[in-house]
Amino acid sequence: MKILILGSGVIGTTAAYYLARDGHEVTVLDRQPGPALETSFANAGEISPGYAAPWAGPGVPLKAIKWLLMHHSPLVIKPMQDPAMWRWGLAMLRNCTAARYRVNKARMVRLAGYSRDCLKALRADTGIRYDERTQGTLQLFRTQKQLDGTAKDIEVLQQYGVPFQLLDRDGYLQHEPALAAVKHKFVGALRLPDDETGDCFLFTNALAARAQALGASFRFGVNVHALTSSGERITGVDTDQGPLRADHVLVALGSHSTAMLRPLGLRIPVYPVKGYSITVPITDASHAPESTLMDETHKVAVTRLGDRIRVGGTAQLSGFNLDLDAARRRTLEFVVNDLFPHGGDVTRAESWCGLRPMTPDGTPLIGPTRVQGLWLATGHGTLGWTMAAGTGQLLADWMAGRRTAIDTEGLGIARYDPAAGPAVGSSVPLRPAP
């Protein structure tokens, strides 16, 4: 079958690989000159199925108020006359209950855990390299209240068989010895030993090359203006280089998916939440992180990527603005210097920001829609890198009508608009246009 994939970020590229491996005629379109040059370019580097959790949860509204008042705040809101932002925010607040948190986290952990297994298999099959490390994640707690608050997360981790360890100071120093000089700042940690790290940009480019070797075509510098359809069937896309026809179209445009789908009457609550990162050259490896750490107070991740330290964080609601805010950089510099004061040279750090495509409940939107031949892979938020391999394999199986390895309940557009998607959990095999 002829398949167009819109977007060559980690989600679109990974889907292209799995679909090309199945023997389909795959073409990926992107406005950038290469793969992974937007949100997938310089993320925090975490592949963290154990840390997969919605931002919306019990107590978050009160925490958000406190965060906004912090000097190094993990949350920034730039008030705008943007109804979409306020609708998204209200929908997120409706998910801040214990019951919704359990449902949403369970869905996310299910997909993220499956994705970890798919990535391991992909790595074994291809030998792909991307500054990967398989040494787990440490979630660091500065207060006893934070440590005690892990009970709800641990309940879900146990439900899905996700390994974890609650560690005191001596325990977490065994895994991150460079924290010895600052151990007095933290009361304990939650370790997720099956989590991994890696450079998403390197991975996506390497996988794009493998997809091309399987026959996939990547067309860069192409602006997609609109999806085209006839009746209830997709026919292709209109671009600045002319119309392109296909039997099936996969929309993997991150935050820009919302506008692309709207003319077809498909409304999805995916909104851009801006994140920042800095990439710091390591000056003393013995004083640098071994893997990934998450500072729970500042919601900042610090990750070892080869001879670099990637520091990522901040949730900023400001629409599609991509300006680099100096205050956000200072927060990232503060955290990495607070944890690893002798590990890297922040004066030589490179700054970046990207737009995370967030849903109000945290779970991405994957699968078919009511428009025959139109598929979604968006809304992964901060977990696109974590969920990429699972999303690609799931779509390949789902499109081919094969039984999926995990339950697809709650992963599609139907959870927001039952009329916009097929029956929950249904398989929709690929077939050519009549």
Image (cartoon, helix red, strand yellow):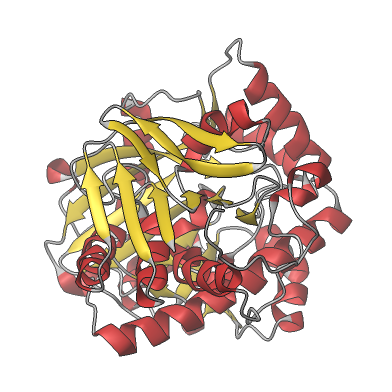
Pick the front one: 375 or 105 = 375
245 displayed left or right of 304: right
Residue at the spot 73% in from the left edge and 68% down from the top edge: 106
In the rendered image, is residue 57 in sight? no
Q: Position of residue 60 (x, y in %)?
A: 73, 43
Q: Which residue: 50% across, 71% down?
A: 396
Farthest residue to the top: give it: 81
Q: Quadrant of residue 152?
A: bottom right
Q: Residue at x 51, y 38 (%)?
A: 257
Height in image: 184 above or below 127? above
Give the quarter of the figure containing the N terminus.
Answer: bottom left
- Viewer-proximal residue, 422 or 376? 422
| Residue 177 drawn at (x, y percent) | 33, 78
> Total label count?
0
Examine the image and state in which quarter residue 220 appears. Answer: top left
Pick out the residue farthest to the right: 99
Q: Residue at x 66, y 81 (%)?
A: 403
Picture quadrant where residue 264 is located? top right
Say which of 266 and 9 sits in front. 266
Left-right relation of 334 to 425: left
Say which of 371 and 17 sits in front.
371
Residue 295 on image: x %, y %: 49, 57
Vertical side of 132 occupied by 80: above or below: above
Spot occupied by residue 219 in the image (x, y as percentages of width and height): 23, 47
In this rendering, does residue 31 appear at all?
Answer: yes
14 relative position to 97: left or right: left
Instruction: Please identify the residue farthest to the front as the structure is shown.
Output: 434
